[in-house]
Amino acid sequence: MYLLNISVGKLKKLAEDDRLFDYVINQLEQLQSFGPLPGIILPMFEAFLPILPLIVFVLANSVVYGLFKGFLYSWIGTAFGSILVFMLVRRLGQKRFFKIIRKNKQVRRVMTWLEEHGFGPLFLLMCFPFSPSSIINVVAGLSTVSRQQFILAVLLGKSVMIFTVAYVGSSIASFAQNPVKSIVVGVCILLFWILGKFIEKRLQHKAEKRKDQNG
């Protein structure tokens, strides 16, 4: 797939010339014979290469595949990519490179914050399209945050983020220009947060019950 081999330099050049969005749409249309794979792979790669424009990929998916399929493919790709990065870091966390990262004061501060609060901050960070999700994935992987909490936050938070980008559109000004869209997005964030906290409590209760039975 030529699109996946495009250089970082060309991406920057296309972005500077305001041609990146049209280019991605054109490439996705040419690759429709591959089914949903291009629409899933591009957002997935963003988890490994944060320089890639996730918002552009989400919007392009919505245009090429339609709102529902575009949302679904983008969500699958970015969620799978985030979870994969988290699992790799969690597995390789004792390597020298990650030990150096873990010693950084700012990294340790964020790790402590995530460990103390769990699902809540992770979910909120995943909800916003401009948050450094790739960094969050790595820091969460280095922390003691449970896999269940992280996966839950990713699945719910990313769904809100992808829906927000696809629904609101490319301009952040749409939030102010269209109050109805703002209300819909706000309600979705609140509902998913409540759902996430409910599921988190159920999982914690089951874990404690299992621990008492084994004890």
Image (cartoon, helix red, strand yellow):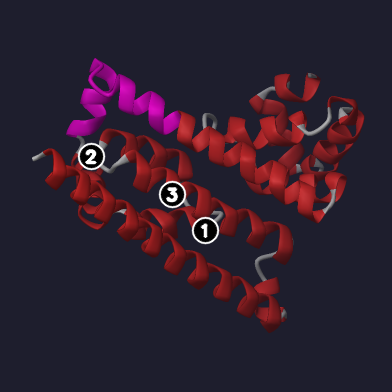
Marks 3/1 in contact by CB < 8 Å: the verdict is: no
Q: Residue at x 21, y 36 (%)?
A: 104
Does label 3 or label 1 sit earlier along the sequence?
1
**Which-is-in-front pick, marks 2 and 1?**
2
> Dot 3: what SS?
helix
Give the image location of residue 67, x and y in percent: 80, 55
Give the image location of residue 171, x and y in percent: 71, 64
Three-letter code, disc 2: Thr
Q: Between marks 3 and 2, how big is the CA–CA gap?
A: 15 Å
In the image, 27 versus 152, the foreground residue is: 152
> Dot 1: what SS?
loop
**How busy is the neighbourhood of tag 3: few (under 14 within 10 Å), some, or many (20 plus)?**
some
Give the image location of residue 21, x and y in percent: 79, 44
Quadrant where the N terminus lies? top right
Does label 3 or label 2 sit earlier along the sequence?
2
165 with respect to 105 (left or right): right
Q: Quadrant of residue 17?
A: top right
Q: Between marks 2 and 1, how big is the CA–CA gap?
A: 23 Å
Q: Which residue is mark 3?
A: 152
- Residue 128 image label: 1
Three-letter code, disc 1: Phe
Which residue range is magenta in the image? 85-103
- Report whether residue 214 is seen: yes
**How busy is the neighbourhood of tag 2: few (under 14 within 10 Å), some, or many (20 plus)?**
some
71 with respect to 200 (left or right): right
